[in-house]
Image (cartoon, rainbow, N blue to C red):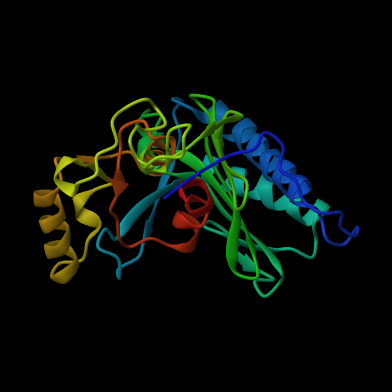
Amino acid sequence: MTSTSASTPTSTPSSPSTPSTAELVAFANQLADEARKVILPFWRKPIDVESKVENDRPVAESPVTIADRMAEESMRHLIEKHHPTHGIYGEEFGSVRTTARYVWVLDPIDGTKSFITGKPLFGTLIALLEDGIPIIGIIDQCVLKERWVGVVGEGTTLNGVKVTTASGNGDEEGNERGIRSGGGGICRKELKESMMYATTPHMFHPGEEEEKFRRMCQAVKRPLYGADCYAYALVASGFGADLVVEADLGLYDYCALVPVVE
């Protein structure tokens, strides 16, 4: 998976009804800014937690807070105000206009369990789909003030600085890619030398999924847990994490990750 980046996304001129890539990226950042403003006042403060139960999932219960709901409401309000023809698919309030050319996919707090226990590894996930394909993705960690922005054809940045996966780097002479990671570490070419993340081993259905994950844990150098979407951001940056293996994800869980990691 390879990421490159440009400081300012470029695109060909477009009509008022078809925003440019730069305009869409700027609006995605505006959504992330709005979510930050809503979430941060609740950080490490007493907060009521409700339970959502989905009996068809390996982990049936998941928490939700007023911060999740208010952040999604704020982002949806901005979309309706500035792009009323765009669709929205959100974790907390469902979907509208999902057949539109452009659809925003929102997960206001991915990793609510981390959020409610004071662990700053949750994130706001924002994706823009064009004709069903993710073209812009944001992973925003508001406490650490870290934001990954991935744009198809433009690459990925972390707080405006280009990053790439461990397998996405070559030397200046164009020799074999994947010698060094974006964070300066050695790229691990074999699975047995790889560092693997998963949010929890309990997210795999008993049977085939669970068995395949067990085999992956045996194949890698070290399985690690509990980073939610932040694990994908680490992979995208080449900081030493090599892969994330997960299951039981909804659209809002992974659409934003695709442009960031690719």
Q: Residue at x 91, y 58 (%)?
A: 16
**Residue occupying the far front of the picture:** 173
Counting labels gives 0
Q: Residue at x 53, y 51 (%)?
A: 259
Is residue 51 placed above or below 247 in the rendered structure? above
Image check: 78 left or right of 70?
A: right
Residue nearer the viewer, 74 or 139: 139
Residue 60 screen position, x and y as percent = 29, 61
Residue 254 screen position, x and y as percent = 45, 56
Is residue 44 placed above or below 252 in the rendered structure? above
- The image quadrant that residue 46 belongs to is top left
Residue 94 screen position, x and y as percent = 57, 64
Residue 190 screen position, x and y as percent = 19, 46
Q: Residue at x 42, y 42 (%)?
A: 168
Residue nearer the viewer, 259 or 92: 259
Residue nearer the viewer, 146 or 8: 8
- The image quadrant that residue 176 belongs to is top left
**Residue occupying the far bottom of the picture:** 99
Image check: 45 left or right of 19?
A: left
